[in-house]
Amino acid sequence: MTAVACFGWGLFGSLAIEVVLAHQALTHSGSQLPSRYRNPLFWAVRACLAVVGGGLAVAYGVDSALLAVNVGAATPLLMQSLARSVPTPPEPLQIVPARIASERPADLKQEIAER
């Protein structure tokens, strides 16, 4: 399978998930779609996520259309788990000016030791 075909199947798999979610929303609420489907920003973000799904299918080197669809469909969950696993950065160090450090060296040593 070519990279373009793999990308297309991954893109399709990612968008297919949204069709399933819209169908579930319509089934549970009658004929009312959630408001997110009327928001252009939602569709812009969703389109980007679909492109990522196609890209991941190509990056994995998938050689089957069904596997590419699976990778595309799994992309939202993969991205969520990656976002949750990103560590939080440590707090920045506080730099004490030399003038203050020379005025109260004992207090500073105690403060540093408490941290």
Image (cartoon, rainbow, N blue to C red):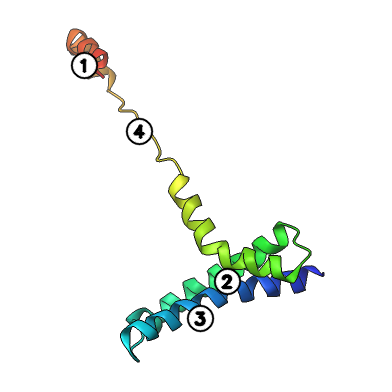
* Residue at position x 26%, y 12% in the image: 113
Depth check: give the residue in front, 31 or 95: 31
Q: Does label 1 or label 4 sit earlier along the sequence? A: 4
* Residue at position x 60%, y 70% in the image: 51
Residue neighbourhood size for the residue with mark 1, other residues' Cα within 10 Å, grouped as few (<14), some (14–19), many (≥20): few
Residue neighbourhood size for the residue with mark 3, other residues' Cα within 10 Å, grouped as few (<14), some (14–19), many (≥20): few
Query: What is the CA distance from the residue labelled 3 to the residue labelled 2?
Result: 9 Å
Q: Nearer the viewer, mark 4 or mark 3?
A: 3
Q: Which residue is denoted by mark 1 in the rendering?
A: 111
Q: Secondary structure at mark 3?
A: helix
Q: Secondary structure at mark 4?
A: loop
Location of residue 75 in the rendering, given as x and y in whole percent from the top left corner: 56, 62
The amino acid type, in three-letter code, at marker 4 is Pro
Q: Secondary structure at mark 1?
A: helix
- Residue 38 shows up from this direction: no
Compared across the picture, whether 108 is left or right of 74 comes to left
Q: Which residue is denoted by mark 4 in the rendering?
A: 92
Per the rendering, the mark at residue 19 is: 3
